[in-house]
Structure formats: structure tokens, C-alpha cells
Image (cartoon, rainbow, N blue to C red):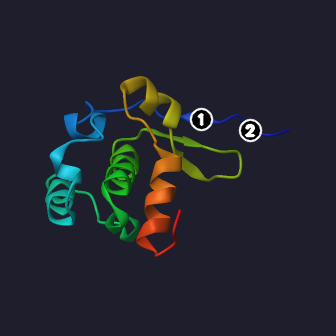
Amino acid sequence: MAKRREAVRPSGSVPAELLDPDASVWRSDRAAADWLEGHGLAWVDRMSAGPLNRRKWAAIGWARANGWTRTLANGCVLPDWRRMREAGICRADGASMVERLRHGGVDV
């Protein structure tokens, strides 16, 4: 029988910048890197694609660092997007994918 997913109770409050996809901190690599450093998080290469990716990957890093995760039956630990969405953090997956494609030189 498959194990149920386990959600970890979050700790800490959500930084205001993660709630605002248009926050100035996501507009440049330098500002985002400073924000990450201030929160003890690491830069992810995909962040250089643009502001949506910087915010998305910062949110993923913040979620993992603060226990906003769920563990699948196979042991894979993922951000708990349902909990994050309820807290006001949106994924913007389609838009961030288009942003990555354009960054890679694909005309979309």
C-alpha cells in the first residue's frame, strides 16, 4: 500500500517580496542575489532567465528552508505549493517557462 504524503508544518512568516511577483527585488540578478543572501538561500542558475524565474526559484528555496514541503511516497521532497498558494505565493509556471525559452533564444 502506498504511503500518504506528509506535509511539514511551516515555520516563519512569508517574506513580502515572495507575495509580489512585481517586487523590485526580482528585476535584477544583483537585487535577487542580495535578497537570497539575506535569507540564507542559494542562487539557482535558472534565475538568470528573468524576474518570474528569480521569484519562483527564490520561493522554492525559501519553502524548503522553512519546512514548507511535502514528502511523496517515493521519498521525493517537494515544495508544498498548496500551502504556499494559500499563503499568497503563486507559481507562474507557464509564464516562467516562456521566460526561460526566450532567455535561451527560442522565439515564442
In which quarter of the view is residue 63 placed? top left
Name the residue at 14% across, 54% down: 38
Q: Which amino acid type is marked by label 2?
A: Lys
Q: Determine the residue positioned at 26% across, 58% down.
A: 41
Above/below status of 55 relative to 88 = below
Q: Which residue is mark 2?
A: 3
Please name the residue shown 19% across and 61% down the image. Answer: 28
Image x and y of residue 26, in percent: 23, 52
Residue carrying label 1: 6
Q: Considering the numbered disc 2 on the image, is that residue within a helix, a strand or a loop?
A: loop
Q: Residue furthest front?
A: 107
Crowding at dot 1, Cα within 10 Å, few <14 / some 14-19 / many 20+, comes out as: some
As helix, strand or loop, the secondary structure at mark 1 comes to strand
Where in the figure is residue 56, as x and y percent of width and height?
39, 50
- Which of the two residues, 7 or 41, is positioned nearer the viewer here? 41
Label ID, residue 28: none
Circles 1 and 2 in contact, beta carbons < 8 Å: yes
Callout 1, which amino acid?
Answer: Glu
Whole-percent x and y of residue 85? 45, 29
